[in-house]
Image: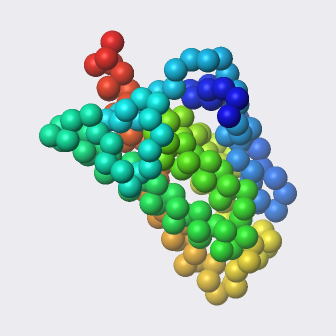
Amino acid sequence: MGGDDSQKLRPWRGAISSLGRSKPPAHCENQHSSGKRRASLPGTYPGRASRASEPVVRNPENRYNVKVHAKITQLTNLIDEAQQLLRKHGEETWANWLEEGCSRIRDRDFAGVQHILSGFGGMGSFNDLYICPTNHHVIEERNVDRVNNKLRALSSEIYKLARDLQNEEQAAQVNRD
């Protein structure tokens, strides 16, 4: 892929495009950096590319690792559901952004969690996305509230799980040092 892009995020202040159709922040795009070792998600084997459906834990008896694996699986499932909802209504930009983060998370790359979190907060963020015909989405006016409520619920759960994983990674890093 041309280098390691983990944990190399540029600061972002955000921007909104016309008609409320926001684009992911610039730092959500692929970035290449020096050859530093990737941070793997806690409870996983560093550098091992596996799928969320595979139980990859250092010690199956360790409840922490099993708990983290369950959160990873739950997070990727929620992201998949949000992607499908966005694609159904013609919001490809944010669907692709979610897909990129989810792919990294499934490959046990902690940068995927950071990628997802980077889209929350600030102007033009994922939180600001509003599905409606005015924003050129494929949706009937009568479904706007229902779809946006579903999107808000999904994004809230995605953010919560990603923050939990980030906090657990930070705690694990302190324990490793």
Up the image or down, 18 lies above or below 90; here it is: above
Residue 119 locus on image (x, y percent): 61, 45
Quadrant of the image occupied by residue 87: bottom right
Quadrant of the image occupied by residue 175: top left
As drawn, the residue found furthest toward the left would be 61
As drawn, the residue found furthest toward the right would be 18
Residue 128 is left or right of residue 90, and the answer is left
Residue 75 is left or right of residue 57, and the answer is right
Q: Which quadrant does the N terminus fall into?
A: top right
Nearer-the-camera pick, 67 or 55? 55
**Count the marks: how many?**
0
Q: Residue at x 31, y 48 (%)?
A: 55
Q: Residue at x 68, y 73 (%)?
A: 89
Residue 78 is left or right of residue 13, and the answer is left
Up the image or down, 145 lies above or below 73; here it is: below
Judging from the image, the colouring scheme is: rainbow
Residue 67 locus on image (x, y percent): 26, 45
Residue 155 locus on image (x, y percent): 51, 57
Nearer-the-camera pick, 136 or 68? 68
As drawn, the residue found furthest toward the top would be 177
> Can residue 2 be seen?
yes
Residue 78 locus on image (x, y percent): 46, 60
> Can residue 117 be seen?
no
Residue 131 is left or right of residue 149, and the answer is right
Quadrant of the image occupied by residue 62: top left
Nearer-the-camera pick, 5 or 115? 5
Q: Residue at x 52, y 61 (%)?
A: 80
Q: Which quadrant does the C terminus fall into?
A: top left
Up the image or down, 148 lies above or below 108; here it is: below
